[in-house]
Image: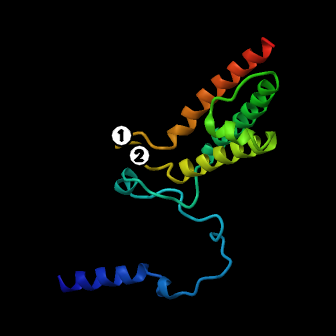
Amino acid sequence: MEMEKHINRFHILERRSGGDRRKERRQILNKHLFAGNRESFRRREDREDAYLVDRYNRKLLTPILMIIFLSICDAVLTLILLDNGAVEINPVMAYSLTHGPMAFFWIKYLLTTFSIVIILIYSNTYLFKTRLRTKALFGMIIIPFFLVICWEFFLISLL
């Protein structure tokens, strides 16, 4: 019995690297400085709760770029429609039009990208205490944007 304790203790000590990694000096420029190193959590129980990460899934890049592209298309098509007598009914965007078309474009772009960043930061949290994660909003945002652009093309075809 005493021999087993000694062997188990030796086995545990043997697996350790020897140094205390918490006392090591950190390099000022390391590979995780700008990229981060946490993309998800290893433990299942940690993944079941909401968590923030340093790196994001690359699969999210496609819907994010699609949303930005659709937002830019929406802004351009809206400006074309406004030049042909349409009226902006969104009060925020109507106010931005008082400062000119470039202000309209940049405010629309900045509001869209700011919203994307907020959704991205909280992409692993649950929506309204359901099992649906916030990152599912990226797919849900694309559909209305696409429908709005189809509607704008239809309106332009009537001109």
Q: Which residue is mark 2?
A: 126
Expressed as whole percent of the image width and height from the top left, the position of residue 13 reads 38, 84
- Disc 1 versus disc 2: distance between alpha carbons? 6 Å
Residue displayed at 58% across by 34% down: 141
Q: Residue furthest left?
A: 1
- Tell me if residue 67 comes above or below residue 154 in the rendering: below
- Seen from the viewer's position, the closer of residues 95 and 123 is 95
Q: Secondary structure at mark 1?
A: loop
- Seen from the viewer's position, the closer of residues 132 and 26 is 132
Amino acid carrying mark 1 in the image: Thr
Expressed as whole percent of the image width and height from the top left, the position of residue 123 reads 51, 48
- Tell me if residue 61 comes above or below residue 51 in the rendering: above
The number of callouts visible is: 2
Residue displayed at 68% across by 77% down: 29
Q: Which residue is mark 1?
A: 130
Residue displayed at 64% across by 46% down: 111
- Tell me if residue 89 comes above or below residue 67 in the rendering: above
Expressed as whole percent of the image width and height from the top left, the position of residue 101 reads 80, 39
Cβ atoms at labels 1 and 2 below 8 Å apart: yes
Q: Secondary structure at mark 2?
A: loop
Residue displayed at 55% across by 51% down: 118
**Quarter holding the C terminus?**
top right
Amino acid carrying mark 2 in the image: Tyr
| Circle 2 Cα neighbour tier, 10 Å, few/some/many (<14 / 14–19 / ≥20) | some
Q: Residue 147, located in which quarter of the rendered image?
A: top right
Expressed as whole percent of the image width and height from the top left, the position of residue 130 reads 36, 40
The label number, if any, that marks residue 45 in the structure image? none
**Quarter holding the N terminus?**
bottom left
